[in-house]
Amino acid sequence: MHKFCDFRPNNTYIWTIFFMSTLTILIVIVFLLGYTSIALEGITRVNKAAVALLMFVLTWTVFMVDPGLYFEGTDPHSVANGRIVHHLGETATTLFFLMGAMAVVEVVDRNGGFNFVRNMMRTRSKRSLLWRVAFLTFFLSAILDNLTTSIVMVMLLRKLVQDRKDLVKIACAIIVAANAGGAFSPIGDVTTIMLWNQGVITAGGVIKELFLPSLVAMLVPVLMLHFSLKGELAEPEITAEDVIDELNAHQRRTVFFLGVGGLIFVPIFHSLTDLPPFMGILLVLGALWLITELFYGTARLKKRENIRNRVSRLLGRIDMSTIMFFLGILMAVGCLEEIGVLTLLGQWLDGVSGGNHYVITGLIGAISSIVDNVPLVAGCMGMYPPTPTGDMAVDGVFWQLLAYCAGVGGSLLIVGSAAGVVVMGMAKISFGNYMKHMSLYALVGYLAGMFCYFLLRTFVF
């Protein structure tokens, strides 16, 4: 323990506790200020990645003022640096997974692979289009991730729907379906990726037990929205781009199935080899990179197009600000874990809820519709250590409900998820419009999915 000055033993103890409390409070204040700034990004216009990185550095800087308050030993600074490296290693597994997945999806997208999906959506019936969009979004988001799927589906929807009101309603369904689809897959949402990497859920367990609740959370609001759509759509115009897509259909379809099939293979690779999931995604990226290099090396393409579509160029299109945000927020949460704040918060939540994990995770899901679900889930992983048996065990009720609630709960408000925010911008949907057309439906679906999970855990699993 660090020596402050030559006080008597009891006074030294009192001063140590006081100084520890002061540093702990200061770290929490830094985190809360940063968290608030992230939540208010739409008002402050300050990129949340910048704030998250500052949170990361400042919380650990305050911690290093005297790490001996938290660690015993002759060299607490070395111990503290070791803990930082430990948290960085855990964080890096998530970051490399995300970067690999982003790169694979970017390759598929830039090579027109997703235009194959558009042909599957073509229909004149508004209601038929709603259901096709909802189911395609639901299943694609389980493979690609909900953010990427939302971007792809809105881009395709804008080419198929001319009427503004119809476009808004179906785009709202995309948000709900994307978040629900991402919740039952280990690679469908950043939060499920985090939980999977942490080892508190397994790919087989979360798919088996969350598929039906997630499907219910999608079906209920889409069914309620179904009755507000009537009539047929206007025939979309055929553009020069459509003709090009048709001429390159075989090439684009090949890239699509290689990329998407590789993403499906990642959980299988993990279960076969027991290697971390990020190694599976890097295997897929390397294989797709090699195949496209060979493909473009023999293709009769214009030189400019040949260079533009190579993976080495597409890597520059990865959203590094998102990666930096996850780095900052996860490392800052790691600091809160080291000072014991998350453990105390978890004990308080258990006391308030009477230990009812349905109440705790349900509230977390509702809160995630207001603030970012990434730090919420990261905080929960620090608050509640996994146990060998019970609700907190691997694939236990708490962790599976957390995956469901953090994902699906973001659909309650349009700003509650990354998918909602991106659709809000691309489809020009206002906060009020989403509240009017979807928020209540999403809430009913959210609760119906939780009830479905309760029935499954009580009578089936």
Image (cartoon, rainbow, N blue to C red):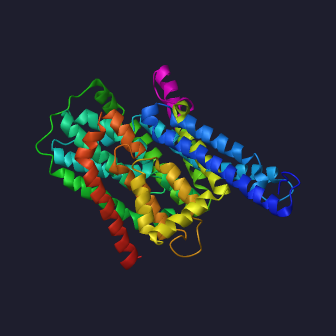
Q: Main secondary structure of the magenta part?
A: helix
In x, y percent, where is residue 103? 52, 39
- Apparent side of residue 94 relative to residue 65 in the rendered image (left or right): left
Which quadrant, please, contains the C terminus?
bottom left
In x, y percent, where is residue 245? 33, 32
Q: Which residues are magenta?
A: 290-313
Total numbered badges shown on the rendered structure: 0
Instruction: Report which quarter residue 152 is drawn in.
Output: top left
* Rendered position, 449 above or below 141: below
Residue 418 sits inside the magenta stretch: no
* Rendered position, 441 above or below 169: below
Instruction: Report which quarter residue 158 is drawn in.
Output: top left
- Apparent side of residue 446 relative to residue 165 in the rendered image (left or right): right
- Is residue 196 visible to us here? no
- Is residue 42 visible to us here? yes
In x, y percent, where is residue 386? 58, 67
In x, y percent, where is residue 129? 21, 45
> In terms of depth relative to the viewer, which is nearer, 204 or 441?
441
- Furthest residue in direction right, as rendered: 6
Q: What residue is drawn where x is 51% and y is 44%? A: 101
Q: What residue is drawn where x is 86% and y is 51%? A: 5
Residue 306 sits inside the magenta stretch: yes
- Apparent side of residue 225 relative to residue 209 in the rendered image (left or right): left
- Apparent side of residue 329 relative to residue 19 in the rendered image (left or right): left
Q: What residue is drawn where x is 52% and y is 44%? A: 35
> In terms of depth relative to the viewer, which is nearer, 169 or 342?
342
